[in-house]
Amino acid sequence: MNDTTTDREHAVPTQTGIAGLDHILRGGFPAYRLYLVEGTPGTGKTTLALNFLLEGRKNGETALYITLSETADELHSVARSHGWSLDGIDLFELVAENEFSLENEQSLLHPSEVELGETVAGIIEQVEKTNPTRVVLDSLSELRLLSQGALRYRRQILALKHFFAKRDCTVLMLDDRTAEPGDLQLHSIAHGVVSLEQSASDFGSERRRMRVVKMRGLKYSGGFHDFTIERGGLVVYPRLVASEHHREFDPAPVTTGLAGLDRLLGDGLVPGTSTLLTGPAGVGKTTTAVRCLVAALERGDRVAYYLFDERLATLLQRSAALGMDLQPYLDNGQLTLRQIDPAELSPGEFAGAVQAAVETDGARMIVIDSLNAYMHGMPSDNFLVLQMHELLSYLSQQGIISLMILGQHGVMGDLRVDIDVSYLADAVVLMRFFEVEGMVRKSIAVIKTRTSDHERIIREFDIGASGVTIGEPLTGFAGLLSGQPNYVPGND
């Protein structure tokens, strides 16, 4: 092994300028290699490539963009849409106007061998002239068309690979997947492959995700990772792996702010656990969750509340009317309230927002209101329950108290849920309406807790001007949880 090979193997990774992608690649692309970035039109290949070159410019490196498809004006237009300037980046537009002009009939008869040879020669000449450390070749589909055959195409790509291998530069080749389905010859040539995908949902914005198909000699984060294209480039949300995130925390229980609920749970809420509040609409799930978060705020903890169903203004007004004014905590930054539109948000983006709330903002309690809207808003996304399981596991590893709200269909009697996520939660609080002598009343019970010996009795509770009140045990009835109780003489 020569010294050059050794130096390259120990070179600092080439950062892409996209924090999420660098995290997936454990620092960036291994330097001085050739990589393939593939995806259909509109998936973000050009934006990723510009992110990559701009990061090089920021680090004082020489960057070269060779375009065979887009014009320089089009690239400048893309850059301006992100608020970028391409000053300091060499743009080499290899779109020969005299060859591809419709007015030049000779171009229609121009032998493909000559066109291909001139194109490759032009690429080599420009690289030798500018001596860049970062190169983008956009796109390989033009070389594929000029090659007019798989054998010649592969030979040309191999020739370019060997040419770049002699130079200290990191190369991204962009491809729009115009090859025949199943044609993986580029995958075998490239040192690494990043695949970008885009899908349109029945309602809402398109969803994008990426996957590192291969990366020789590197342990990367596998699987699909959601990403969005924002002003300023790609924002990648690495797939959350709970086992990679753990920190020490104090598991001592904390109060819910309601003495009766603390007794029902055994000893309050335990850091690192998740609690599911479930029941029909209007029974008091959100109000109970707000009372729990107010107790956390009063302890000095930070809280992040993700609201899928209700308007923020409605939640604030209703809470204030019950004696729980959240506005001061919003003003001092201790409470974060975020209205979520699930039609516009991917599961990965939501997980990324929760992770940022924990690791950047220091939130110690997370409230998700509600799981119904989260699941219904993303019906085309498979494995949502598994993703929620991973998110809750991550929060548990971080010592976060998680509160989830799950609505049930119906008001009394046989109540149904669209999704059964009770097994995900460490504790389940069940709320019910019941009727006695023409009066509608409410009950609350804890069905399970994994961390303590909870009360197994059912208590009455009420919501009034003074907030939430957990009453005495309902000992004179049977069948309370069905909503149609029977009075049992001698049990009261």
Image (cartoon, rainbow, N blue to C red):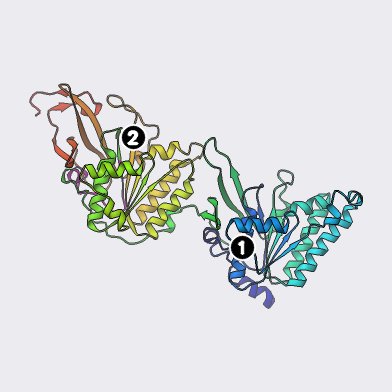
Residue 334, visible in the rendered structure: no
Residue 251 in the magenta stretch? The answer is no
Residue 30, image quadrant: bottom right
Image-based side of 367 in relation to 320, left or right: right
Name which residue lies at 33% across and 40% down.
405
Q: Residues within 10 Å of mark 1 (few under 14, many from 20)?
A: many
Residue 262 in the magenta stretch? The answer is yes
Indicate whether 431 appears above or below 347: above
Image-based side of 274 in relation to 486, left or right: right
Q: Which amino acid does label 1 sit on?
A: Phe
Count of numbered circles in the view: 2
**Mark on residue 407?**
2
Q: How far apart are marks 2 and 1 (CA)?
A: 45 Å
Where is residue 212? Give x, y as percent.
Answer: 59, 54
Image-based side of 435 in relation to 94, left or right: left
The residue range painted magenta reads: 261-276
Q: Is mark 1 on a helix, strand or loop?
A: helix
**Mark on residue 52?**
1
**Mark on residue 99?**
none
Mark 2 vs mark 1: which is more N-terminal?
A: 1
Q: Residues within 10 Å of mark 2 (few under 14, many from 20)?
A: many
Residue 424, image quadrant: top left
Please report contact status of discs 2 and 1: CB closer than 8 Å, yes or no: no
Q: What residue type is labelled 2?
A: Gly
Where is residue 334? Give x, y as percent.
Answer: 30, 57
Name which residue lies at 62% across and 71% down.
9
Residue placed most toward the observer, 441 or 148: 441
User: Can you name the residue that lies furthest to the left here?
Assistant: 490
Where is residue 469? Give x, y as percent.
Answer: 16, 40
Q: Is mark 2 on a helix, strand or loop?
A: strand
